[in-house]
Image: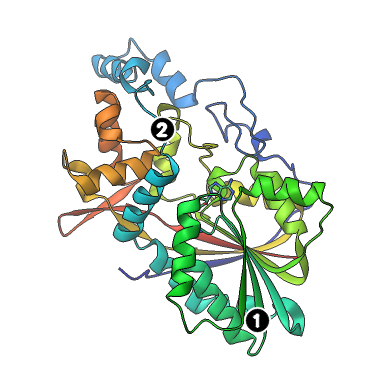
Amino acid sequence: MEPVAKVKRFCKAKPNQITDGCLRAGVFPKGFCPMNGSRLPLVRTAHEADARKSKSESFETDVLLNSLDDSEICVTPSMRSLRAEEYTRAFQSFLDHSTEHQCMDQFNKTELPNIVASVGNGKSTISVLGVGSGTGEQDLKMIRIIQSQHPGAFIANEVIEPNPHHILAYKEAIKNSPDLKNVSFTWHQQTSMEYEKQAKEGNVEKKYDFIHLIQMLYRVENIANTIKFFHSCLDCYAKLLIIILSGNSGWASIWKKYRHCLPPTDSGHYITADDIKVVLEGMGVKYQVYDFPSVWDITECFIDGDTTGGHTLDFLTGTKDFMNTAPLGLKQQLRQALGQPECSTKKDGRIIFRNDLSMIVVSS
Ligand SMILES: C[S@@+](CC[C@H](N)C(=O)[O-])C[C@H]1O[C@@H](n2cnc3c(N)ncnc32)[C@H](O)[C@@H]1O
C-alpha cells in the first residue's frame, strides 16, 4: 500500500529548554527513563490510580480492576526477549507484512534528494555512517540517492551494526548490486555505544557528511547521549537523519498500556518521535520533521496457532513465542487493544495497524 499523505514541519529549537526529556512530568509514568537510561521508582499511572480510587463505584469497575491484576497480565519467567537470530526472523516478517520500507521509499523519492544535495559542499569523497543499518536495504538506496546528487563523488560508507546475521545479509545485498560503483564499505560489528567508547578512547574524531539512525534508537543505552554523540560526528555542511515511529502510531498506544508487561529488550526503550524532539530541543539544534504514513497487516495475530501471527506478536512485543509464553490475560488484553481505533483500522476484512514514521533531519 502506498503512503497517501505527509505533513512537513520545520522546527527551530527553543534554547534553554530542559535537556533531559525525563524531567517532563508524566512522560514516562512507569518509572523507566529512556532518555538517560535510569530506572526510577515504579509509580502508578494516573489511569491506574483513578481506576483504583473508583473501585467501589460499580461492578464494571471491579471487573476492570480484576483484569488488571498483575498476576494475570504481567511478564512471567517463561517470557523472554528475542535473541539476535529470532529478532532477524521476526523483523523480516514485519517487513514482509508492513509498508515500512515503502514508506521510507516515498521519503527517499520526495525529500531525500534535496536533503542530501548540500552535504559535503562539493567534496570529492562523501563520508556516510549508518548506525543500526540492519540488512542494508535502506543504506544502499540512500547511497544511490547521494550519488545521483553528487555525480562522480566517491562514497566512503561505514556501518555500525551489532547483529552478525544482519551484516552477512548486508554483504550479500552488496554482492547482488553490481551497479553499485565508487563506494567503499567499512564494517563495525558493534553497538553504537561500543563505537562511541572506542572513538573516545582512541581519541578518533572521525567526521561524516551524512549519518543515519533508522529505526534503531529503541535499543541504545542512552538515547540523548547517542544523539548528541552522533551529532558531534557531523562535519560542516552535514546532516543527521533519524527515522523513528511517530507519536500517533499504534505502537505508542500499545506501549503506553503494556510496556511494563513485556520482557526487557536489549535496552527496552519505548520511544517515539515526540521524545526525540524533546532531546533535540534541549540540544538547541535546528531540525525538520517529515511525517509519512505506514501500515502493518496484523490480521494473523488474531488466529491461534498461525505462524505469521506468531511472528507478528513476537516482533510487536519483543518476546520469543509470545502466544505460548504470555499469561492468558495479557494475550487477551493485548489482542483486544490491537483491534482498537487508537491502533488499527479494519479494511476488506483485514486488521491494519498504524505504523506511521517520522523522518527527522538535523543539520550540523
Ligand atoms: C529495526 S532494525 C532497523 C534496521 C534498518 N536501519 C532498517 O530500517 O531497515 C534495528 C537495527 O538496529 C540494530 N541495533 C540494535 N541495538 C543496537 C545498538 N545498540 N547500536 C547499533 N545498532 C543496534 C539491530 O541489530 C538492527 O539491525
| In-front residue for pair 162/54 | 162
Mark 2 or 1 closer to N-term? 1
Q: Position of residue 64 (x, y in %)?
A: 29, 20
**Residue 334 coordinates in the image, percent (x, y):** 30, 34
For image coordinates 54% across by 20% down, the residue present is 43
Residue 257's tag is 2
Identify the residue at the far top of this view.
56
Mark 2 burial class by Cα count in 10 Å: few <14, some 14-19, many 20+:
some
User: Closer to us: mark 2 or mark 1?
Assistant: 1
> Between 176 and 291, which is closer to the camera in this rendering?
176
* Residue 6 showing in the rendered view: no
| Mark 1 lies on residue | 117
x then y, percent, for residue 249: 42, 51
For ligand 1, tell me if the residue under mark 2 lies within 8 Å.
Answer: no
Check the image and report above or below for 261 versus 86: above
* Amino acid carrying mark 2 in the image: Lys
Q: Viewed as shown, does residue 205 lie left or right of 161? A: right
Q: Residue at x 62, y 74 (%)?
A: 184
Task: Classify residue 65 by image quadrant.
Answer: top left
Determine whether 58 is above or below 163 in the image: above
As drawn, the residue found furthest toward the bottom would be 152
